Image (cartoon, rainbow, N blue to C red):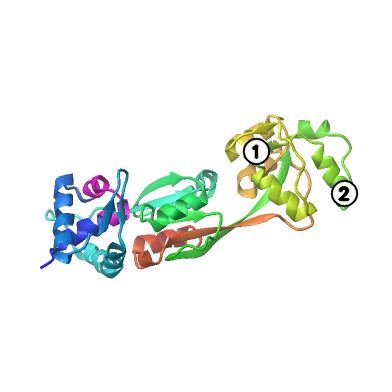
Amino acid sequence: MIDLEWLRSFAAIYRLGTVSSAAGARYLTQPAVSQHLAALEAAIGQSLFVRTSRRMVPTERGKELYSRVAQSLDTLEHVLRRPDGAAPEKPIVRIGSPQEYFYETALPRLAGATCRLWVEFGPTPELLERLERGELDLVIATQRLSTRGIEYGKAADERFVLVGSPEKMRSGGRRPRPANLDQVERWLGGLDWISYGVELPIIRRFWQEVFHRRPEIRPVLVIPSLHAILKAVELGYGVSLLPDYLCRGAVSAGRLRELWKPPMPVANELWLACRKTDLHRDEILRLRERLGAG
């Protein structure tokens, strides 16, 4: 007969990725959680995880078992009380996100959340891989990639704004007529640019959508942080493209100016991704609502 505690430890390992994290979340020792898992695997007759040096990766049998028991375990957690009569510990939700969006937009929306939050930053493809492997529970994604077993909900749109400092603009030469794209392209090509990467990730997309060609720009500063780019633009290093949520305050305060608006806004969709097997979890559903994908 399978013990309930074995299943609770199994689910904790699945969600948190390691025996040590599961033990901490369950207020048990690591040997106790390891024994629970070993007993469960012996009872089932199959391995539920592949043990690596960094994490526990669920097998196909482990994924199947989790999808079958997760909702029942979560329902049980709501009605159980600890021996002293206190409410159960708050559940943990592990969130992956772009750092700047989380700081500027997501963090204020998550204030007052009724669960514990563990947040990690990184590029969307890497975060989605970790979500699929069970290392994260929720990902704010800048791309909607085709990933097995992942549910996407629209979170927001971000518009990229072409900005520079007032001082830089006064020394930037005569500005062209906004409707003449050839003149605008030549003018922009002669400015000092600040880029997130040497491959001009945001600038390249802007150029291709607006001017239908690749930019011929050699940035004066390459710095992989949107907050640092914002500061560098304010200090007069050059011009750049920034998400509207990040530069709105600086533009309103007069520290930055929007240089030019393209005929069609260059925008990006942000998505909230989670595993389909976790859509029953109340804490996941509540966070999706807070972040705009409810």
Taking the image as shown, residue 57 lies to the left or right of residue 142, namely: left
Observer-nearest of 211 and 78:
211
Instruction: Provide residue 146's location: percent of width, then percent of height.
Output: 51, 63
Read off the residue under disc 1. 198
Q: Is residue 215 magenta?
A: no
Residue 111 seen in the current view: no
The residue lying at 66 percent from left, 47 percent from top is: 202
- Looking at the rendered structure, the number of numbered marks drawn on it comes to 2
Q: Which amino acid, mark 1? A: Val
Q: Residues within 10 Å of mark 1 (few under 14, many from 20)?
A: some
In the picture, measured across the screen, residue 21 lies left or right of residue 215, that is left
The kind of secondary structure element at disc 2 is helix
Q: Disc 1 to disc 2, how far (Cα)? A: 24 Å
Element type where label 1 sits in the image: loop
As for residue 14 lying within the magenta part, the answer is yes
Give me the disc on residue 107. none
- Magenta-colored segment: predominant secondary structure: helix
Note whether residue 282 is visible. Answer: yes
Name the residue that disc number 2 marks: 182
Picture coordinates of residue 12, whole percent (x, y): 26, 55
User: In the image, is 18 to the left or to the right of 220?
Assistant: left
Labels 1 and 2: the sequence-earlier one: 2
Identify the amino acid type marked 2.
Asp
Quarter holding residue 129: bottom left
**Residue 75 percent across, percent down from the top left:** 25, 67
What residue is shown at x 36% (from left), y 56% (from top)? 134
Q: Which residues are magenta?
A: 13-25
